[in-house]
Amino acid sequence: MFERAGNGWQLAQQSWRVLKLDKELLLFPLISGIACMFVMASFAVPLWMSGYVGDVADGNEEGISQMQQIVGYVVLFAYYFVNYFVIVFFNSALIACAIIRFKGGNPTLMDGFSAACSRLPQIIGWALVAATVGLILKVIESRSEKVGAIIASVLGMGWAAVTYFVVPVIVVESVGPIDAAKRSFQVLKTTWGEALVANFGIGIVVFLASLAGILPIVGGVVALGAGMTALGIAAIVLGVVALLTVSLISSAMNSIIIGALYLYAAEGTVPEQFDDDLFKRAFAHK
C-alpha cells in the first residue's frame, strides 16, 4: 500500500514536469470551466424565472404537474448533454496535446482544438450516453431521499471508474461511445491500481496546495468579523484565486496522467517524460 502511494506521488510529480513544458495546456480547463458556468447560467436562469426551481427548493413538489416534471427532466437532460460535451471536448484537446508531447512532438493549442474537432461525432455520442446515465442516476436518487441517494452514488462511482479512460480512447482510437466504454474498461483492468494511486497522489498535492487558498479565506472572514473590511476582502479574493489556480493545475495534471496510463496500457510504451522503471515495476501489465 505504501509503495503504491509512493508511486502515486511520483506520478503526480512527473505529470507536473510535463505541465511545466506546456503551460498553455492550462487554458483548456480554464476555458472549459468558464464555458460550463455559462452553460449553467443559460439553463438555471430560465428555470428559476419559471418558478419550477423555486417549487422544488421549497419542497412543493406536489404542486408540480406531471407535464412540468417531464419538462424538467427534458431540460435537465439537455443541461447534462451540453455540460458533458463542453467538458469532454476540452479534455480531449488537452489529452491530445499531452499525447503529442509523449510521442516527442511539441504541441500547440491549435493541435488540441484540431484533434477535438476531428472527434466531434464521437464526443457528441459520448455526451449523449453520459447525459442519459446522469439522468437515470438522478431519477433513481429522486425516488427515495436516502436509499435512492446511496444507490445512485454507488452506481455513479462504478460508472466513473469504468469510463475513466474514455476520453483518450476517443482521441486515439476514434471509436463510438459504446466501444469507447468497453475499451476503457479493458484498459482499467490493466491499470486500475495505478489509476487509483495516481488520483491519490494528486489528491495529496491538491490538499496541501489548497491550504494556500483556504487559510487566506479563513483569515479574511476573521478580519471581516473584526471590522477590517479592506483586509478581509483582499484575503478572501486572494484565497479564491489560489483555489481556482489549484483546481486548474490539478485538472490538467489528472488529464496528463490519464493519457500516460492509457498509452502504457494500450501500447506498452512508457512516455519519455515518465520514469520507465516506475511504470514497469508498478503496473501489472497484461
Image: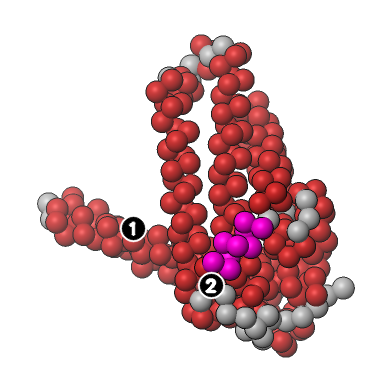
Answer whether residue 235 is magenta in the image: no
Viewer-nearest of discs 2 and 1: 2
Quarter of the image where the C terminus is located: bottom right
Q: Say which of 124 and 266 sits in front.
A: 124
Separation of residues labelled 2 and 1 (CA atoms): 29 Å
Highlighted range, magenta = 110-118
Q: The residue tagged with tag 2: helix, strand or loop?
A: loop
Mark 1 residue type: Val
Viewer can see residue 145 = no
Rendered residue at 74%/61% (across/down): 169
Neighbourhood count class around disc 1 (C-alpha, 10 Å): few under 14, some 14–19, many 20 upward: some
Q: Decide if residue 30 is on the left or right side of residue 241.
A: right
Residue drawn at (51%, 76%), measured in percent from left and top? 22
Q: Position of residue 233 (x, y in %)?
A: 21, 55
Q: Quadrant of residue 99?
A: bottom right
Q: Is residue 178 above or below residue 213?
A: above
Q: Position of residue 197 (x, y in %)?
A: 66, 69
Residue at figure coordinates x 70%, y 62% from the top left: 171
Towards the viewer: 93 or 84: 93
Residue highlighted by disc 1: 240
Visible residue check, residue 52:
yes
Q: Would residue 286 appear left or right of 33 to someone viewing this image?
A: right
Against 274, residue 166 (above or below) is above
> Which mark, by number, is residue 108?
2
Frontmost residue, 199 versus 134 = 134
